[in-house]
Each structure stands twice: as C-alpha cells, then as structure tokens.
Amino acid sequence: MASKQNLTEIAQISSNIEKTSSTLEQVSHQNAGFVQAMQSSLQEMKSSHDHLLEMQSSTEAAWKEYQKRFEGVDASLGNIFRQLNDGMQQYSNLYKEYLLEMDKHTSGITETLASAVMELGESIDEMNDALNRPKK
C-alpha cells in the first residue's frame, strides 16, 4: 500500500513538473516575442543613432562654412555651437554603448532561459524514464 501511495505521489510530482515545464515553455515563447520586440526596438534605436550622426555631420559642415564666412565676428556664439557639438557627440557615444549593452543583456537572457527550459525538459524525461521502468 505504501508503494502505491509513493507511485501516486511520484505521479503527482511528475504532473506538477510537466505543468511547470509547460508554463516555462509559454514564458519562453513570450520572452522570445519580447526579445524580438527588443531587437526591433534596438534596430530602430540604431537607425535613430545613425540619423543623429548624419545630423551631427551636417551641422558640423554647416558650422565650418559659417566659420569661414564670419570667423571672428562672434566668438561666444562659436563656443556655444562647439559645446552643442560636443554634447551631441557624447550623447551619441553613450547611446551607442547603451545599445550594445542592451543587445548583450538580451542575448544573455535568451541563453539563460533556453538553458533552463532544456534542463527542465531533461529532468522530466529522466523522471518519466524512471517511472516507466519495470519494478524489480
């Protein structure tokens, strides 16, 4: 009778593990969608970053032309534009670093989830094998 109870408990544990595995698989699929959305967002951020760099180059070219025409007219205005240019460059660099770190982090999350799901699947397979073995 005790062995029948043990089998019932093992069957319940196996059922709970299967439910947990199913839930983890659903979470994994949801996270895959999240990762895809993050990658899409990351691509849009990179595009915005590239656009900012183009704007910066254009601004810099316009500023150089302005300097040629009016050099020495207003030194303080020149300092303001240089500070703006430096600020945009710093922002651009920080933004690029942020995007790279976001990409690394997203990849790490995906790998961790995939590993956890794989290990859980292996554990379930081992439990099922143990339950299905004939008793001696």
Image (cartoon, rainbow, N blue to C red):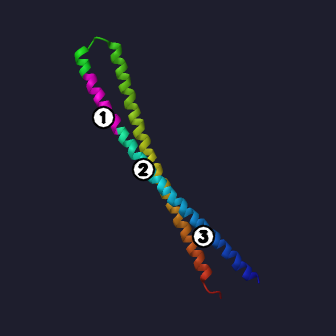
The answer to which of marks 1 and 3 sits earlier in the sequence is 3
Looking at the image, which residue is at 70% across and 78% down?
A: 8
The residue at which mark 2 appears reads as 39
| Residue 27 versus residue 91 in the image, above or below | below
Viewer-nearest residue: 56 or 34: 34
Viewer-nearest residue: 43 or 128: 43
- Dot 2 and dot 3 residues touching (CB under 8 Å): no
Using the numbered discs, state the Cα–Cα distance from disc 2 to disc 3 in whole angstroms.
Answer: 31 Å
| Residue lying at the far bottom of the rendered structure | 136
- Asked whether, in this view, residue 120 is left or right of residue 108, the answer is right
Q: Amino acid at mark 3?
A: Glu
- Could you say where residue 7 lies in the image, as x and y percent from the top left? 69, 79
- Mark 3, secondary structure of its residue: helix
Q: Find the magenta span and give its range.
A: 50-64
The residue at which mark 3 appears reads as 18
Q: What secondary structure characterizes most of the magenta part? A: helix
| Residue 79 versus residue 120 in the image, above or below | above
Q: Which label is found at residue 54?
A: 1
- Dot 1 and dot 2 residues touching (CB under 8 Å): no
- Mark 1, secondary structure of its residue: helix
- Mark 2, secondary structure of its residue: helix
Viewer-nearest residue: 6 or 54: 54
| Residue 71 versus residue 101 in the image, above or below | above
